[in-house]
Image: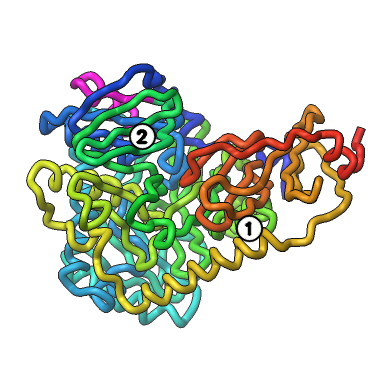
């Protein structure tokens, strides 16, 4: 077996999608602006919404905190599929057959739209038709997979029940969806963003929204102090950053998952696969200049609640080696997804009382088709006042009883994490080596310390600026992560991911902190 260093684990995590594309650079917002529709967030949802609205002649602007398509969109597994776990039987049972049909039609339509845009615009994005599989290694999922096959077929999806799959290990059962696809998301979306700009759209990067004032029109304030005034506002910022109504922080939780891009001796057999089990292990291939890559994913956990996140990558390495003859792992990355209580996205009016404020979030790890479906739904709501799929995606829909149970469980978890962080016993003396981050008690205060590879110490107040939860160190990505609502911060306290809008406070009493830390030099 090759050493970890030979298999790429000596390299820092890096997304293949980002590494293999040149980032477009768009201007910072430096002056006030008025538009018909402002869109906060430059991921696949925001760019797709902007593109579709622009084709209808709507004057729009996209406001992005970082660079477009570098967040969750740049860290996906990029499966274009209507197969979102064992979802259709669940929707039919807990909601209605009509809702299941809407969800199927929305996602199947999204697949067709991606293929049509790529064809019409001649976008080379490694798009290929694939079958999508859910498989199980356990007897208890066999009947569930059989039922899912029947329900999906009744909704117009071409689905088949199987007892074996092309991957090199035995299974108990599987369902296959045909006419699905995969692509390189940034190769598809970066040209779409350019098309949008060339047709009169506006994109502003490095322009973090820090407040939203007024209604009708909305006034969006950025970190530079400039304002965007808009008659209508779409919040497509992954986790909704608007807390004045909707209580989304009680209805969404953040989950991280991991990907290893593997070079193997064997040729990949084709298809996209995901396990029905909790591990959620998934497989797909990707063409690259370095040869075929096999994307092995899974190992999810709630953001900020993993023990040592480096172990998640090691677990994927182990799975890869059990399945293939691994020669190298040139890329690995992790992503963050917003999960909803009933497993369906929130797309539509932010609340039933905000007719000009819209949201698109909670894709539950299936953001490629759901984002495109969201763009179509929001375009229809804004242009026509209605969408054929609005009910199943409606953020104000009545949730099933099981969702009420999930509400209690998830919010008790938040309470537990909040209390545990406040009362946790911290070490009086610690050792912090280069590349390590730890939590200590200094001057009676919880303090996060990180020593970079040059030996410089960086210290922050670990209280999340969103709602006051205490952060934990993410060793794999070297960030401070919130176990309550998923905000993430760099080792110097800058916001990486919301819902937090403000950076962490810095701890400046280095003399006291150094006394707590054993000297390493």
In-image side of 157 versus 130 (left or right): left
What residue span does the magenta drawing correspond to? 186-204
Classify mark 2: residues with Cα within 10 Å, few (<14), some (14-19) or many (20+): many
Q: Is residue 355 above or below residue 420?
A: above
User: Residues at badges 1 and 2 in contact (C-beta under 8 Å)?
Assistant: no
Tell me which residue sits at (24%, 65%) in the image. 397
Tell me which residue sits at (21%, 55%) in the image. 353
Place residue 308 in its image quadrant: bottom right
Residue 378 appears in the picture as rendered:
yes
Seen as rendered, the residue at the extreme front is 214
Query: Secondary structure beneath disc 1?
Result: loop
Question: Which mark, residue 306?
Answer: 1
Seen as rendered, the residue at the extreme left is 384
In-image side of 204 versus 434 (left or right): left
Front-most of 141 and 406? 406
Place residue 132 in its image quadrant: bottom left
Q: Mark 1 or mark 2, which has the lower sequence index?
A: 2
Residue 297 appears in the picture as rendered:
no
Front-most of 191 and 485? 485
């Amino acid at each position: 077996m090759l050493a970890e260093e030979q298999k790429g684990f000596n390299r820092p995590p890096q997304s293949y999608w980002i590494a293999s594309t040149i980032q477009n650079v768009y201007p910072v917002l430096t002056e006030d602006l008025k538009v018909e529709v402002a869109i906060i967030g430059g991921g696949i949802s925001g760019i797709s919404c902007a593109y579709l609205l622009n084709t209808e002649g709507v004057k729009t602007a996209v406001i992005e905190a970082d660079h477009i398509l570098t967040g969750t969109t740049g860290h996906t597994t990029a499966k274009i599929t209507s197969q979102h776990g064992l979802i259709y039987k669940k929707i039919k049972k807990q909601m209605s057959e009509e809702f299941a049909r809407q969800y199927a039609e929305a996602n199947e339509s999204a697949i067709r739209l991606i293929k049509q845009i790529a064809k019409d615009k001649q976008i080379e994005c490694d798009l290929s038709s694939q079958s999508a599989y859910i498989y199980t290694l356990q007897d208890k999922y066999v009947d569930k997979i059989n039922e899912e096959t029947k329900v999906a077929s009744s909704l117009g999806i071409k689905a088949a029940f199987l007892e074996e799959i092309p991957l090199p290990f035995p299974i108990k059962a599987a369902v296959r969806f045909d006419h699905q696809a995969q692509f390189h998301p940034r190769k598809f979306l970066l040209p779409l963003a350019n098309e949008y700009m060339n047709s009169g759209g506006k994109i502003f990067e490095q322009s973090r929204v820090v407040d939203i004032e007024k209604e009708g029109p909305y006034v969006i304030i950025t970190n530079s102090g400039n304002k965007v005034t808009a008659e209508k506002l779409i919040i497509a910022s992954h986790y909704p950053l608007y807390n004045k109504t909707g209580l989304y922080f009680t209805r969404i939780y953040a989950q991280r998952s991991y990907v290893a891009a593997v070079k193997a001796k064997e040729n990949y057999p084709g298809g996209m696969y995901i396990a029905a089990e909790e591990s959620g292990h998934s497989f797909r291939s990707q063409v690259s200049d370095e040869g075929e890559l096999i994307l092995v994913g899974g190992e999810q956990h709630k953001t900020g609640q993993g023990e040592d996140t480096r172990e998640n990558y090691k677990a994927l390495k182990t799975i890869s080696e059990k399945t293939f003859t691994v020669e190298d792992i040139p890329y690995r990355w992790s992503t963050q997804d917003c999960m909803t209580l009933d497993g369906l996205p929130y797309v539509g009016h932010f609340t039933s009382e905000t007719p000009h404020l819209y949201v698109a979030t909670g894709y539950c790890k299936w953001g490629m088709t759901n984002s495109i479906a969201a763009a179509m739904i929001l375009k229809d709501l804004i242009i026509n006042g209605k969408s054929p799929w609005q009910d199943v995606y409606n953020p104000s829909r009545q949730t099933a009883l099981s969702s009420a149970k999930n509400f209690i469980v998830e919010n008790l978890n938040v309470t537990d994490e909040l209390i545990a962080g406040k009362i946790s016993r911290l070490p009086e003396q610690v050792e912090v080596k280069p590349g390590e981050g730890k939590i200590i008690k200094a001057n009676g205060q919880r303090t996060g310390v990180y020593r970079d590879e040059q030996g410089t110490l960086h210290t922050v107040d670990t209280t999340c600026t969103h709602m006051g939860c205490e952060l934990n160190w993410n060793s794999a990505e070297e960030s401070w992560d919130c176990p309550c609502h998923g905000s993430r911060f760099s080792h110097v306290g800058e916001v990486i991911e919301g819902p937090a809008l403000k950076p962490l406070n810095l701890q400046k009493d280095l003399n006291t902190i150094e006394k707590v830390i054993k000297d390493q030099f």
